Amino acid sequence: MAGLVNNLLILFVVFQNICLGFRSPLSVFKRYKDTTRPLSSECLGSDRPVISLGLSDFALDIRMPGVTPKQSDTYLCMSVPLPVDDEAYVVDFKPHASMDTIHHMLLFGCNEPSSTENYWDCDEGTCKDKSNILYAWARNAPPTRLPKGVGFRVGGETGGRFFVLQVHYGDISAFRDKHKDCSGVTLHLTHQKQPLIAGMYLMMSVNTVIPPGEKVVDADIACHYKRFPMHLFAYRVHTHRLGKVVSGYRVRNGQWTLIGRQSPQLPQAFYPVEHPVDVNYDDILAARCVFSGEGRTTETRIGGTANDEMCNFYIMYYMEAKHAVSYMTCTQNANPEMFRNIPQEANIPIPVKSDMLKVTHGHHEETKGTDKSSLLQQAKKEEEEILDQDFHIEEAVEWPGLDLKLGQVSGLALDPENNLVIFHRGDHVWDENSFDSKFVYQQRGLGPIEQNTILVLNPSNAKLLHSMGKSLFYLPHGLSIDKNGNYWVTDVALHQVFKLGAHDKEPLLILGVALQPGSDRNHFCQPTDVAVDPITGSIYISDGYCNSRVIQFSPKGLYVMQWGEETSLGRARPGQFHIPHSLALIPDFSQLCVADRENGRIQCFKLETGEFIREIKHKLFGRELFAVSYVPGGFLFAVNGMPYPGEAEPVQGFVMNFSTGEIIDTFIPLRKNFEMPHDVVASEDKTVFVGDVHARAVWKFASIEKMEHRSVKKAGIEVQEIKESETIVEARLKNTPEPTDHLKKQEKQHLVQQASTGVSFVLITTLLIIPVVVLLAILLFIWWKKTTVYGADGEHKLGSSSGRILGKLRGKGGGGLNLGNFFASHKGYSRKGFDRLSTEGSDQEKDEDDGTDSEEECSAPPPPSAPSSS
């Protein structure tokens, strides 16, 4: 019997430790407690920044640490680390702010705040890395709620580890008494996996110009949606003072469904979508901002100061967890013609009382002038937040195109149907015998290439769709395709540029004189690339290996202007080139970016004037940067050259944020190795192709979430899914999109699987309780048996052993476990007293990299004497 009692004691101790582990979730917050910053004694509730709300839930209090702004329109930031290492979900927000002192608050999630101070001026930025808007609050703004079962994912492998609070103090007259402000927000977080993940979709115009005095100016944005279904539940509009109305729609089969419509002069909160709207594969998302230039004496462009304008339509959505993407963006107008059918309501301004304008904006009229020299200063904070998506470029290893039999691959492009077009040299090669010292081609006796040099491939399966270019070229180099599907190519041996129709045997236009190098208006010297402005039709040619210039021609091929010069000794100055090797035209910003190959940098210029705007240069580029490509939405892709002996920078591909120039990601192939990647092209879904002139190969890369993934092939769609979590960022269309009802069926099935997680939790809890009940029953039986058989003596013996156990179960004795209190304190979670509150807000009107009044936004070694030819 004594052995039985001892075994029961051991069983009880083990169970007690398990229960205590569940009972003390705050034990995981020790790391957070050690790093918590001291706050002002005036901040109520700040002494307990983390509060347990049950077995799996907790609250996190994020407050300004007792600050007193010294001038109006001050933006202050502070950060709080996520107090747990594993994945959690923000399911609710409770603001602590007064409209008398706060204009608006924004809450961001990221991995590295811009400062480690208790608080800092937001002119320094909010985050050093990627930042996502999680919450916004604005005075006079109505609340909206996160739907049940929806949460923002934080922590773990993919979520941010810090929260950064930004507070905009508009008018500081309320601080005349020098009191300290402790505004902020309390988050309700849970470890329970949420079946639906919240995210943000930003539609943003980047090239709108509002003429002075113009009564009505429309800014239209539209993108095709190419992902799994998402469900819209809130929207937010943003312009500056010239905006009259902003409207957003889903367009399906020609039918326009309103998402939301609001005056941007009203409090810029997240307003609830009145009628549920779902967005499926191949739907179109469209938005229109209506402006008026009345009262202005100069042009108004998109930018960050109060004198500039913005056109933003935010959509807050949720997706089934497995397919969730936290941020998406649209900055183009994919179908201008469709806006002829936009509902008339989108053109009707919403009247706003004049006394609401100051309350809503809270800005003072003194603003700094806009820097007209660069649209870099106009792509502000909101664009950067959306562009900083957590994705990774990885080779699509199942793509068979790597096995194609090609010559030296010199150029790549995507046609209007998104087919891959390859320009290669067939059986010709460029080597040390190809040219003499005056750049005259020495192998004319070989004749033109007898193979088709232009190949059109299905981007999904590398199937050859069309080929052309036989007997036309000697040494192909650059390739680009205009909006009408015409091919523009360069030949470095012929020193010419050609315009070819996709199915024409003869060129439509030829620039340059065959086999004659030169540097005047009618000659080229080994021209490298071509770019065509989709709006004006202007032609830009980089020329080249033996000239250091960019030349502009009219759509008919007439000389317009040129810029550039040879690189001088020492550091390469702006506008100097050492082989302008590749061009990327950025119509969104009216810029032309040049891969300045031997200077290892990218230079960007104004299209209209050729005026230098900026340089993008990173140590990772090494000495050579071969090619650059732009994707609408704000991404630059580039490839560098092999490192020189003794240098460490590897040959690789780069993904950059166009507005900031920062490197977001790098990529290398898994099959074979880059030898001399010569050209790169990318589509809007961030599918990337790289052509290598030495390896004679083309790689395909896809954009995926930063998690382990597996391939799943569906009828008509090839999708890469993230294992047991998030899916792709890419869905590659093969023939026809997968039926929407099939995707919905998948989504419902997964929701059922997610719901089973909750059932498992209840089952585990029940199984833990059963041993306790059995233990109590056994102990009571032993006590009754001893009392019956042994009488008082037996009772005395029990008091020295089992009696101590029962005493502890009743809560007696130090360190005992009171089961009644234990289970009472861990009943099912109740949201009473913590109802889900809104994500409200005005705008993020401070640039993370700019000190203006609104949204945020290298040197080269001496060139080698003999650069490699390609």
Image (tube, rainbow, N blue to C red):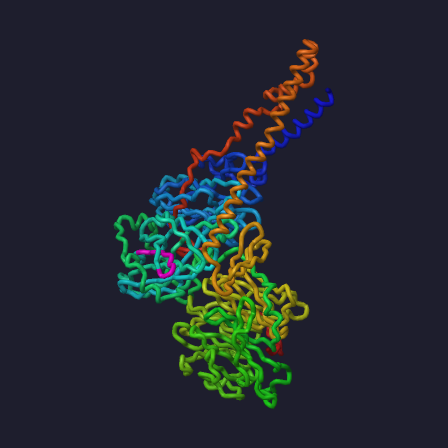
- Judge whether residue 277 can be spotted in this image: yes
Left or right: where 145 falls relative to 115? left
Q: Position of residue 859 (x, y in %)?
A: 56, 68
- Relative depth, front residue between 397 and 553: 397
Q: Position of residue 190 (x, y in %)?
A: 51, 40
Q: Is residue 455 magenta?
A: no
Q: Quadrant of residue 632?
A: bottom left
Looking at the image, the residue that sits furthest to the bottom is 445
**What is the quadrant of the C terminus in the image?**
bottom right
* Magenta region, residue range: 245-254
Q: Quadrant of residue 201?
A: bottom left
Above or below for 777 versus 109: above
Q: Is residue 252 magenta?
A: yes
Q: Position of residue 323 (x, y in %)?
A: 51, 52
Above or below for 482 versus 55: below
- Judge whether residue 81 can be spotted in this image: no
**What is the quadrant of the N terminus in the image?**
top right
Residue beneath the point at 46% across and 79% down: 501
Residue beneath the point at 43% across and 36% down: 834
The prevailing secondary structure element of the residues shown in magenta is strand
